[in-house]
Image (tube, rainbow, N blue to C red):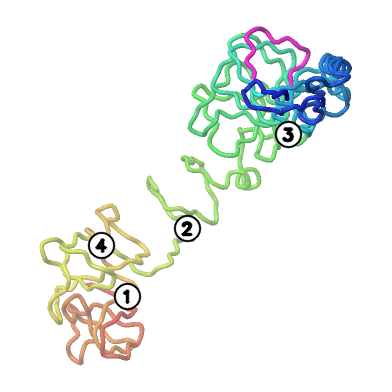
Amino acid sequence: MAYTIVKTDGTVLTTIADGTINTTSTSVGLPGRNYAGYGQSLDTNFVHQVENFAATTPPTNPLRGQLWYNTNANTLYVCPADGTSNALAWLALTSTSGGGATTFGAVTVTGNMQANNVTATNIVTAAQGVFTNISVSANANIATANVTTGIIGTLTTQAITTGATSTAGTLTGTWTANGTASGNALIVLSGNIYSNVGIKCDNYMYANGVSFSPTGTYTNANVAAYLPSYTGTLQPSSLTTSSILGGGTIGGIWTLSSGARLNATYADLAERFEADAEYDAGTVVELGGSAEVTSVDLELSEVVFGVISNTAAYLMNSAAGTDKTHPPVAVSGRVAVKVNGRIKKGDRLVSAGKGRARAAQPGEATAFNTIGRSLVNKNDDGTGTVEAIVIIR
């Protein structure tokens, strides 16, 4: 009667006919009933199992869970699946040689793991571990924790972060930053260096590492090159510069010295007046309405007052309001004026009503209704704007 061989998991491995021996289903010979010489086969099987199939290559026809002692690596391996012939796919269990490798799926160590070195190439988790040396070949991700006892004598690393820009970190104690040969000891790429108790410096240096004393006189040579932008308050006794940019407020009383002058890009003198509506640049206004000024309504108006400007060279009463509530009214100088009809250079401008001006006809212009004089020609009958000199009396 043939033998039917069943594996531990209940699956049938093979059937062995009487008087034969199976050497293809496993790494050992499986003799059938009445096979002559079965004793030699059994003895050979025992020897192979005792030595864990010690050889330079895995045994043939291995079964899952079978052991193999790799004589090249002096390491015991476990077969991960039936028929695995690739030695690299077997799982290494132990090594008897220095520097040997052991591979596991996931291992939980409940006692103390004591060794000269532990090399972790994937993930190591533990509630407590004592290591003499730890070698990390790639990245180490350590969850939020504290070193409660012990001291890290020397730490050499390329980056120390708190995980995110919104997460604060703290250095406690006295720290010394030793610079490189170029002199850089601490480089701040973004953010600020903040101290709520002050910063003590034994030496002051420019951004390029050159020493300087904070006392004495400063010139362009030792300040301008190193402070290209400053948002605080400067209080020099004397300031000589070719450009002041950004806008802001000049406080105090200032006097132009003999021969000094202020030059402006634009050419009209304006003042803010409260308007009864929002008017755009070039609108001709008069005194009246529900506020201080309103759009001129009548032709040849003798209460005409000025022209709305958005290019004032000098703006008076500037803090009275905004351009919407208190628009700048040009009362003198060059300004763009909304006009109707044809105009010749030099024509006197008078009110045309509805916030516009026109060229005065012969005999129309008086000292009371003249807005100013056009500086350009306008050669069409429609509406538009002209540059004009405005003088309001």
Cα distance in 3D space between marks 2 and 4: 34 Å
Q: Is residue 266 magenta?
A: no
Element carrying mark 1: strand
Cα distance in 3D space between marks 4 and 3: 56 Å
Q: Which mark is residue 327?
A: 4
Query: What crowding class fits label 1: few (fewer than 14 Cα within 10 Å), some (14-19), or many (20 or more)?
Result: many
The residue type indicated by label 3 comes to Gly
Q: Where residue 318 sits in the image (x, y, percent)?
A: 30, 55
Q: Earlier in the sequence, mark 1 or mark 4?
A: 4
Q: Of circles 4 and 3, which is in front?
A: 3
Cα distance in 3D space between marks 3 and 1: 59 Å
Q: Of circles 2 and 4, which is in front?
A: 4
Foreground residue among 16 and 233: 16
Q: Where residue 4 sits in the image (x, y, percent)?
A: 69, 24
Q: Of circles 3 and 2, which is in front?
A: 3
Q: Where residue 52 sits in the image (x, y, percent)?
A: 82, 18
Question: What residue span does the magenta drawing correspond to?
Answer: 107-120
Which residue was labeled with disc 1? 336
Q: Earlier in the sequence, mark 3 or mark 1?
A: 3
Q: Main secondary structure of the magenta part?
A: loop
Whether the residues at callouts 1 and 2 have beta carbons within 8 Å, the answer is no
As displayed, is residue 50 above or below residue 72?
Answer: above
Which residue was labeled with disc 3? 183
Foreground residue among 108 and 209: 108
Q: Where residue 177 sits in the image (x, y, percent)?
A: 68, 25
State which quarter of the image contains the N terminus: top right
Q: Quadrant of residue 34?
A: top right
